[in-house]
Amino acid sequence: MPNSNYKNWETFISRTKLYLIIIGILIITICILNYRLIVPGIIVYALIIAYTNWTDNKRKAELSEQLKDLTLNVNTTAKTTLINSPFPLAIVETNGNIIWKSEKFVTEFESLDININEYLSEIVKSIKLTIENKEDNKEKIKGTVNTNLKIQNKDYKVLGSYVKSHKHHSKEQEYTTILYFIEDTYLKNLEQKVKDFKMCVGMIMIDNYEEISQRISSEIKPQIIAKMEKYIYDWASKYNSLVIKTDRDAFFCLMEKKYLKQAEKDKFSILDEVKDIDVPDMLQPTLSIGFSDDGENNVEKAESARTVIDIALGRGGDQAIVKMDGRYQFFGGRTQEVEKRTKVKARIVSHALRELISEADNVILMGHSNGDMDSIGSSMGLYRLIKTLGKEAKIVNETTGIGLDNFLTEAKKSEEYQDAFVTKQEAINSIKPNTVLIVVDTHKKNYVEVPELLEKVNKIVIIDHHRRSTDYIENAILTFHEVYASSASELVTEILEYSQLDIELTQIEVEALYAGIMLDTKNFTFKTGVRTFEAAAYLRKCGLDIIKVKKWFQSDLQTYQIISDIVSKSEIVNDSIAISEYESDDQNVNIIAAKAADELLTIGGINASFVLGKIGDKIYISGRSIGGINVQLILEKLGGGGHITLAGAQLENMSMEDAKQELINRINEYFFEIEN
């Protein structure tokens, strides 16, 4: 309305000037024609100008009065709206001064047993920080407030705006903020109900169904299977969930999110209930459980649940894994992996791998960073398979260390292996349209020797024996991942054995494979099953010289003295866990730490050991156990992984003392979870 009046007034002024100019021109014309009319013409023109000024002032006065009335009405309306606002309202300054509170604000908050001024102060601090950041960045300050508060059992959305309010007595620029408290407790509760009733899809599998079926008598087998199934159905019923048996050892489950959270609080008690079932022949039944809410619909959730159950199986079973809100939660997983006696999968993988290699342009073999005898040994075993099939092969290796350095020097004396080992750049340059990449002794994206190869090669094969972690390589077209196996070298030996090819392993290749098995089993002490000895027997038939391999593991006197010093400085925590540090800046820290951790287990009363070492800004932790303590679960909390009896982790940008304290905290957390 005011804008319309101003426009009309401007139009009137412009027209008046035009009329005065026209009248002036006419009077001048008349005076030129008749000189006697000059004086009367001037008098008439003066009177016209006087009348015009009088009407101009009158219109201005009328317009001013209209604007005053309009402003008064707007101010009155605004004040009435503020005073009678249906929402709690407060006006505060960025210096913390509270200017005014509405009656609704007073009745809403001051009856509560809280200091509402503290909440206002937190909001003001946030506003002030936003203003300071924008001033530092020379941005135009936009005065909006949008935040959420929970006051006792109510939720509020706080909306508002702030404007400059320069005070003449202060040099500082202050801001006045109007805050509206809009209660949205009902909406929040509704959102929570939607989340609670969100359906999660789960998979349940009996880990050792085959072993139970094969090793117990047919008379009691139905009773034991029925008892396991009853436990599963009863457990699901406890949480109002639907369970459908989809296979003889697999179940499909639908569970609401609120009940899944309750199952998490109960630590998935079904895991222990099933293990307590009395089964003959020293067998212990275990379950693997995977749940997920990841997906827009139940089909996508089911796919995600299959991935989760694969992770559980890849970690050795006897555990539950929940993927909720994009995060993984692990429960159980404290028992040793069950060795699979069937070799069907090894034969299938061997045949599939032969087909892939036969169709490939070339093959690149890659182990984990800071390679060891297992990664090199398994790579060399596969190298011979590839060469037997008449294909080009390269092994990526840029890491050397104690024992491994000497071994590689010996291997490269062979004319064939002089060019077999390549650097990162050479491997990247050798990629062809139909290249196959075989990753051995790891399945983690960020732990391979050259992570870039995973993105540049389309066909990826994984051969690994470590418990699966959540950052596994997802796009592999063939995976041979068996956590019961002692080593990647054992798995590769089985592939060679069942390849149905006339493979002639060289002496150095046989020694490398056997050395890989010896390294990860600690001389056939840990994770050694029937198939481990069968693999060793196959290598012995191939001409293995055991004494020569033994020499690869001999430490020089200086290294032995370092290890002895590390052992002597160890301290005991939680009664049976030894922790020590290796503080020297040595490129062989990870190898020395591993050997020292092994040595600590030879001391009576020590059930687990951890040795920390530092290279650059990285802290390496080697964990070992004789089986009673799961070092994998402990180091997994620090971003590491491995097996129950052998695991490792790396920490970055942390001092040795802080890393040690972090490790102790995770050990205490591990025992707390067991006790509760």
Image (cartoon, grey):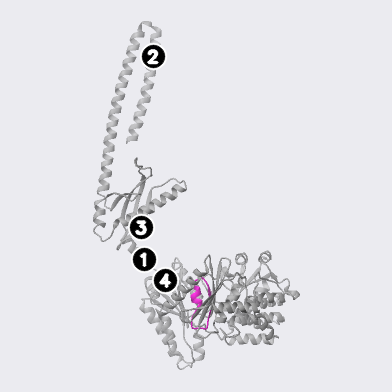
At mark 3, the secondary structure is: strand
Task: Where is residue 337? Give x, y as percent.
Answer: 52, 82
| First in sequence: mark 4 vs mark 3 | 3
At mark 2, the secondary structure is: helix
Q: Quadrant of the N terminus?
A: top left
| First in sequence: mark 4 vs mark 2 | 2
Label 3: few (<14), some (14–19) or many (≥20) C-alpha neighbours in 10 Å: some
Q: Which residue is the site of mark 4?
A: 200
Instruction: Answer whether labels 4 and 2 touch (C-beta < 8 Å).
Output: no
Label 2: few (<14), some (14–19) or many (≥20) C-alpha neighbours in 10 Å: few
Quarter of the figure with residue 665: bottom left
* Residue sitting nearer the eye, 364 or 202: 364
Q: Which residue is the site of mark 2?
A: 26
Task: Where is residue 161? Give x, y as percent.
Answer: 36, 48
Is residue 289 visible in the rendered image? The answer is no
Is residue 72 visible in the rendered image? The answer is yes
Q: Is residue 239 magenta?
A: no
